[in-house]
Image (tube, rainbow, N blue to C red):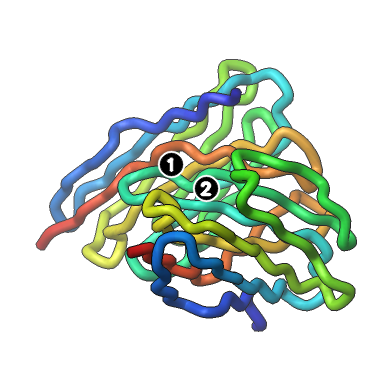
């Protein structure tokens, strides 16, 4: 069965650079969520989209923005990167019907040097 | 801010032991409680989604119960195996299509 795809899997950037993370949800899933997991921490919700509209916002810095496109894939844009942005970024997808089971991608590990 | 807590933080058992851990959450605005199994370098794997008070779910040697009135869920592993070693996360969902608020996880290590 198709799963959530994230790219790239690993990314190394320097301070003040920008990064773009991509997420391709499971086919027919209309909702995408982004989570950030710092070293030794539990995953923290950043932002979610339903039908290309932002549906919920968590602890996402102003330096970050995200959007969902017409094919339902989503991109997380991160600018003016800081050392503290180094983390594992997970994307999950779900449908609005049913129990809202969220299926996670493999994550993108971002390292900011 | 929702507070989802898990205990213990880590657990070390021997092969064949049965074990259980706890997830506590605020009982107001409850919609669903999710359990995930997360191995290092892999994505979290959904184990159970529970919505009703008194729900019991089972998947092989792993089972879970839910008490929404008092705000807790238990995850049980019967006859632990080394391949059960992982971090087990619970996550609270307060509405349809809403974000998950994760607990801090219980890291289980099963040795021979």
What residue is pinned by disc 1?
A: B75
User: In which image quadrant can residue B8 be found?
Assistant: top left
Label 1: which secondary element: strand
Q: Is residue B97 above or below residue A8?
A: above
> How many angstroms separate mark 1 from mark 2 (CA)?
8 Å
Q: Position of residue A52 (x, y in %)?
A: 87, 62
Q: Are marks 1 and 2 in contact (CB under 8 Å)?
A: yes
Q: Position of residue A47 (x, y in %)?
A: 69, 49
Label 2: which secondary element: strand
Other-residue count near label 2 (Cα within 10 Å), few / some / many at <14 / 14–19 / ≥20: many
Residue placed at 13% from the left, 59% from the top?
Answer: B111
Which residue is outermost to the bottom?
A1
Q: Chain of mark 1?
A: B
Residue placed at 50% from the left, 42% from the top?
Answer: B90
Could you say which is closer to the camera, residue B26 or residue A8?
Answer: A8
Residue placed at 75% from the left, 73% from the top?
Answer: A73
Q: Position of residue A101 (x, y in %)?
A: 69, 55
Which residue is outermost to the front?
A16
What residue is pinned by disc 2?
A: B35
Report the quarter where the N terminus of chain A lies: bottom right
Frontmost of labels 1 and 2 is: 2
Q: Left or right: where does residue A66 sit relative to residue A68? A: left
């Amino acid at each position: 069965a198709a799963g959530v795809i994230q790219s790239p899997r690993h990314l190394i950037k320097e301070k003040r650079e920008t990064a773009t993370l991509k997420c391709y949800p499971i086919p027919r899933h209309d909702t995408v969520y982004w989570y950030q997991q710092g070293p030794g921490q539990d995953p923290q919700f950043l932002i979610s989209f339903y039908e290309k509209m932002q549906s919920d916002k968590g602890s996402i810095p102003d330096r970050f923005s995200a959007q969902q496109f017409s094919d339902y894939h989503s991109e997380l844009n991160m600018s003016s990167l800081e050392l503290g942005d180094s983390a594992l970024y997970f994307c999950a997808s779900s449908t609005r019907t049913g129990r809202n089971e969220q299926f996670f991608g493999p994550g993108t590990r971002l390292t900011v040097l | 801010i929702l507070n989802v807590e898990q205990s213990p933080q880590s657990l070390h058992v021997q092969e064949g032991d049965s074990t259980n851990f706890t997830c506590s959450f605020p009982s107001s605005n409850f919609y669903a409680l999710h359990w995930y199994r997360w191995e290092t370098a892999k994505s979290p794997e959904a184990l159970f989604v529970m919505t009703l008070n008194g729900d019991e779910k089972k998947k092989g040697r792993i089972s879970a119960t839910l008490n929404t009135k008092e705000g807790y869920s238990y995850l049980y592993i019967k006859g632990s195996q080394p391949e059960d070693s992982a971090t087990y996360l619970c996550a609270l969902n307060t509405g349809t299509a809403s974000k998950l608020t994760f607990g801090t996880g219980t890291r289980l290590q099963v040795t021979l």
